């Protein structure tokens, strides 16, 4: 048994050589006994609102996941089950940890449990049987998949069967052009047996709000059926960030009833789509800009511009990231109106804080994703 320190908390660790349910439960009970007896110090609350299942590639990634879950313990206390595949392991084994965090002076310490299950890929079925046994009864199982996943793999299928909701991040996918249609197909196959959430979509929330606010006024709403051109710019360092630009296009296209068509131009840093709004053409351009631009806080969306014309009236609407947490909004219909708006810088912890508490499928996300899949799969 070892006691380690964490940022803002403590961690009691116990090694278990075999992944056996009785041994694991006994180890967790012993960790709680030590914590309750004063090994941590102060009053302590043992509570959980869910089981969080996290497939990870290695111990380094597991450590990063553990630190992040600890930061979320105040809002999402849980039992965390971390799955590691290691071909060198002959028999599945488990590593147990209990984490404690005091939020404010005088408050009880929050306590949550971590179980790392390490097994070879050949023992996947045995490991997932353990997962279903160790999941807290009567509480939801939320899976957070922080890395790229194989939608046709056995692990994905087992996780879908064991989970109520799966949180992923398509911005982490190195090839969103291939992955987004696969994700859309996986959601259709699941047929609402499990809800899906995408942190890329969550990042788009402030952008979607700012774009929608342009068309609150009746004179601007009348131009929604007269959009001629949309341009979206994004910065990327891994390539997966293109998913945010594509999902934003999917959102605009589905809200306005556009007909998807394959790209007429497709280059590494530029896509052009010629879509249809009824019989009227709409030109859409998605451009990748350098991630090292001084005004860029990170790989992310950079700007969206919508051009509409009806009769003698022509209007341009632009949202442009222009600082650490700020956006410039521009409406120009002959009279230029420029403003500033808050564009929050959302960390991974912020995004998970919002998404881990959800349960229902997001219909608008699924419609937007299906639109993107049709764009990318169209003959």
Image: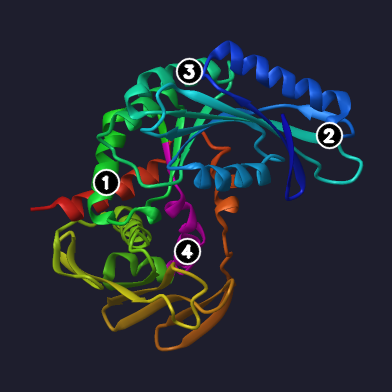
Q: Secondary structure at mark 1?
A: helix
**Callout 2: 10 Å neighbours few (<14), some, many (20+)?**
some
Instruction: Point out residue 204 in the picture as x, y percentages from the top left corner.
Output: 46, 58
**Callout 3: 10 Å neighbours few (<14), some, many (20+)?**
some
Mark closer to the chain start, 2 or 1:
2
Residue 94 drawn above or below residue 54: above
Q: Secondary structure at mark 3?
A: helix
Q: Nearer the viewer, mark 2 or mark 1?
A: 2
Residue holding disc 3: 130
Look at the image and give the residue range highlighted in magenta: 196-218
Q: Secondary structure at mark 4?
A: helix
Q: Nearer the viewer, mark 3 or mark 1?
A: 3
Evaluate if marks 3 and 1 touch, with contact meaning CB atoms under 8 Å apart. Answer: no
Evaluate if marks 2 and 1 touch, with contact meaning CB atoms under 8 Å apart. Answer: no
Alpha-carbon distance for marks 4 and 3?
Answer: 41 Å
Mark closer to the chain start, 4 or 2:
2
Residue holding disc 1: 370
Residue 178 drawn above or below residue 143: below
Instruction: Point out residue 75 in the picture as x, y percentages from the top left corner.
Output: 68, 40
Alpha-carbon distance for marks 4 and 2?
Answer: 44 Å
What secondary structure do most residues of the magenta stretch adopt?
A: helix
- The residue at 39%/54% (across/down) is 172
Instruction: Point out residue 340 in the picture as x, y percentages from the top left corner.
Output: 58, 77
Q: Nearer the viewer, residue 30 or 328?
A: 30
Indicate left or right for 219 with 239 as reference: right
Indicate left or right for 150 with 4 as reference: left
Residue holding disc 4: 207
Instruction: Decide whether residue 265 is among the magenta residues.
Output: no
Residue 215 visible? The answer is: yes
Instruction: Point out residue 120 in the picture as x, y percentages from the top left corner.
Output: 37, 28
Indicate left or right for 213 with 305 as reference: right
């Amino acid at each position: 048994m070892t006691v380690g320190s964490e940022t803002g908390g403590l961690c009691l660790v116990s090694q278990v050589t075999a992944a056996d349910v009785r041994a694991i439960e006994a180890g967790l009970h012993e960790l709680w006994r030590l914590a309750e007896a004063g090994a941590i110090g102060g009053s302590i609350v043992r509570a959980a609102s869910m089981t969080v299942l996290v497939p990870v590639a290695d111990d380094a990634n597991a450590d990063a996941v553990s630190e992040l879950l600890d930061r979320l313990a105040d809002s999402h206390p849980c039992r965390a089950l971390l799955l590691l595949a290691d071909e060198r392991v002959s028999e599945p084994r488990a590593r147990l940890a209990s984490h404690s965090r005091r939020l404010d002076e005088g408050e009880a310490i929050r306590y949550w449990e971590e179980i790392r299950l390490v097994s070879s890929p050949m023992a996947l079925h045995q490991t997932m049987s353990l997962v279903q046994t160790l999941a807290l009864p009567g509480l939801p199982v939320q899976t957070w998949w922080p890395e790229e996943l194989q939608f046709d793999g056995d692990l994905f299928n087992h996780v879908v069967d064991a989970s109520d909701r799966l949180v992923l991040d398509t911005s982490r996918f190195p090839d969103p052009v291939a992955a987004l249609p696969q994700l859309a197909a996986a959601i259709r196959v699941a047929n609402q047996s499990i809800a899906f959430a995408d942190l890329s979509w969550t990042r788009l929330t402030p952008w979607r709000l700012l774009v929608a606010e342009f068309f609150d006024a009746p004179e601007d709403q009348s131009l929604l059926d007269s959009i001629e051109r949309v341009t979206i710019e994004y910065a990327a360092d891994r390539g997966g960030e293109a998913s945010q630009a594509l999902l934003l296009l999917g959102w605009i296209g589905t809200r306005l009833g556009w007909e998807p068509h394959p790209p007429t131009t497709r280059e590494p840093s530029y896509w052009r789509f010629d879509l249809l709004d009824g019989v009227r053409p709409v030109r859409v351009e998605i451009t990748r800009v350098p991630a090292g631009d001084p005004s860029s806080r990170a790989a992310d969306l950079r700007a969206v511009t919508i051009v509409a014309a009806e009769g003698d009236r022509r209007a341009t609407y632009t949202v442009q990231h222009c600082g650490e947490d700020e956006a410039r909004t521009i409406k120009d219909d002959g009279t230029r109106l420029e403003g500033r708006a808050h564009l929050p810088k959302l960390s991974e912890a912020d995004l998970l804080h919002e998404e881990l508490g959800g349960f229902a499928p997001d219909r608008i996300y699924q419609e937007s994703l299906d639109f993107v899949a049709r764009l990318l799969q169209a003959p």
